[in-house]
Amino acid sequence: MKKHLLLLSFLFCCNLIFAQATLIINEVDYDQVSADTAEFIEIKNVSGSAINLSTIQIYLYNGNNTTLAVYDTIFLPSYSLQSGAYYVICGNSGGVSNCNHVEPVLSNMIENGSPDAIAIGSSLFPGVFADVISYEGDCPSPWIEGTGVIIANSDNNDDIKIGLSRYPDGTDTQNNSADFSLRCITPGAANIADNTNCDGLPTGINTNSKTENTLYPNPANDKVSYRLGKNSGTVSVLIYDFTGKQIVNNAISNATETIDINTSELANGVYIISIKTSDKTVIKKLTVLHR
């Protein structure tokens, strides 16, 4: 009898711990221009210790009044997600930066709502959710926290670089409509305040295009390259953190069409980079994410 009570007590405590949102849905992009080939779900570990994802499942729920059912379950692998770290799930690794887990779905991995929901669950505790987002309206309980994100504030197919993000990053008030808003997408990195002019941000779209005035790769690991488009003599490179503190002040002599900028000593985070040539100054946002 004591063993049964201890087991029940253990399961009850674990249920409570899991329900206290140690993992959250931090960012979602489910609707893009034309075909939805760059969809992703980003989860974040907001607990104080690493979490193994081997028992974690992501439930995709159709909240249409005539359906009301889970239309897909994503089973995550054994992976130790460190405290404060992000884990990105996508359907097309060629379309999403920093994708950790690729589902065999090249497009339309996530339904577009009116309304729909996404939940984090566990095979250990069926029916208990660590976190839920209901978007484009209110899904029935338990597929919602507070009120759902209304259609007007939900993702749309107007801009490939816009999605639903928690801002400030990782904020969870248990109310979907308060926690999520339209922001420039940053898969695998901290969410930011920007919701317009997303060029130069870690947009989620991997591209090998190296057109003039572009930073690549972005997010950067140990270095980032910038294409000037022409030989430019001396180029000034300044990097600031988001408090305005200058971190880097370099001058590159005899710059060719493309310059490389060392980011190996920068901490993970979002920065402002200023690149000045003899005829112009270009300001970009740069994310550093060491792998």
Image (tube, rainbow, N blue to C red):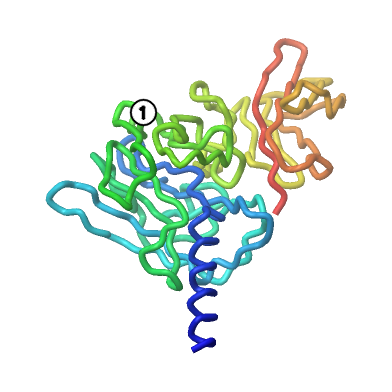
Q: Is residue 222 left or right of residue 254?
A: left
Asked which quadrant contains residue 114, the reply is top left
Q: In x, y percent, where is residue 14?
A: 53, 68
Q: Nearer the viewer, residue 1 or 67?
A: 1
- Which residue appears at 69% of the width and 24% of the height? 230
In this view, 290 is above or below 121? above
Q: Is residue 112 left or right of residue 211?
A: left
How many circles with numbers are drawn on the protein?
A: 1
- Which residue appears at 48% of the width and 85% of the height? 4
**Circle 1 is placed at which residue position?**
153
- Which residue appears at 40% of the width and 62% of the height? 128
- Which residue appears at 56% of the width and 26% of the height? 193
Asked which quadrant contains residue 220, the reply is top right
| Callout 1 crowding tier (Cα within 10 Å): few <14, some 14–19, many ≥20 | some
Residue projecting furthest to the top: 279
Residue projecting furthest to the front: 1
**Disc 1 on helix, strand or loop?**
helix
In this view, 169 is above or below 43? above
Q: In x, y percent, where is residue 134?
A: 34, 43
Q: In x, y percent, where is residue 155?
A: 36, 34
Q: Nearer the viewer, residue 223 or 265?
A: 265
Instruction: Name the quadrant of the C terminus.
Output: bottom right
Q: Is residue 78 left or right of residue 289?
A: left
Q: Nearer the viewer, residue 201 or 19?
A: 19
Q: In x, y percent, where is residue 89?
A: 47, 55
At label 1, the amino acid type is Asn
In this view, 232 is above or below 203? above
